Image (tube, rainbow, N blue to C red):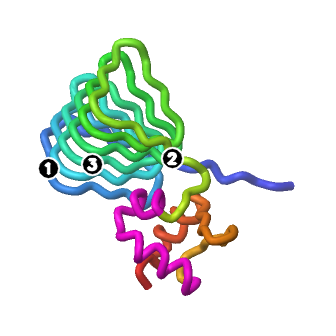
Amino acid sequence: MAFKKKLEEKILDVDAAMQGTLAFKEPVNLRINGKFEGNLETKGSLTISQTASVAGDILGENIIIGGRIKGRITAKERLTLLPSAIVEGDIYPARLNVAEGAIFEGKCYMLHDFLNAEQLAHYLEVDLNSVLEWANTGKMPATKEGDHWRFERKTIDSWVASGKIGK
């Protein structure tokens, strides 16, 4: 008989004004209701409520925006802009859902399951030469197709999370 351990749901609800950097290494359901200035890095689900205002970059898996955001948003799984959302800045979603009424001012670059070297350099915010060096020396998981390198985004995300980037 197999037993499944139920994962304890971790919820953090922020109603205050905060600034700085918040980084979560474990999955959490984070909801911002107040004002936040700085960078957010989350695993799990992030909700920016209708009353929230965020100035800074966001990196997460599932991101739901109902308030005001000014900055870069990278959603590795899904980005949802609710009717009350106001987003100023470039977005990088794997999947995108924009409700009627949402306001978006910026550029959208869809994340693909596989990236070329230039796309990966942009995704990781590193120099193209670094990506090519890591691929050529086997320090980074990659597949060579003809003269071009191909990178699986989920494998690269795991590689970065393991702390091997630049080593």
At label 2, the amino acid type is: Leu
Say which quarter of the image contains residue 54.
top left
Q: Earlier in the sequence, mark 1 or mark 2?
A: 1
Q: Residue at x 44, y 29 (%)?
A: 80
The CA distance from mark 3 to mark 1 is 12 Å
Magenta residues: mostly which secondary structure? helix
Q: Residue at x 69, y 70 (%)?
A: 146
The CA distance from mark 1 to mark 2 is 28 Å
Residue 74 placed where, x, y %? 39, 46
Tags 2 and 3 touching, CB below 8 Å: no
Residue assigned mark 2: 111
Residue assigned mark 1: 19
The CA distance from mark 2 to mark 3 is 16 Å
Tags 1 and 2 touching, CB below 8 Å: no
Describe residue 17's horizontal placement relative to residue 49 as left or right: left
Residue assigned mark 3: 57
Residue 7 placed where, x, y %? 57, 50
At label 1, the amino acid type is: Gln
Say above or below: 122 vs 84.
below
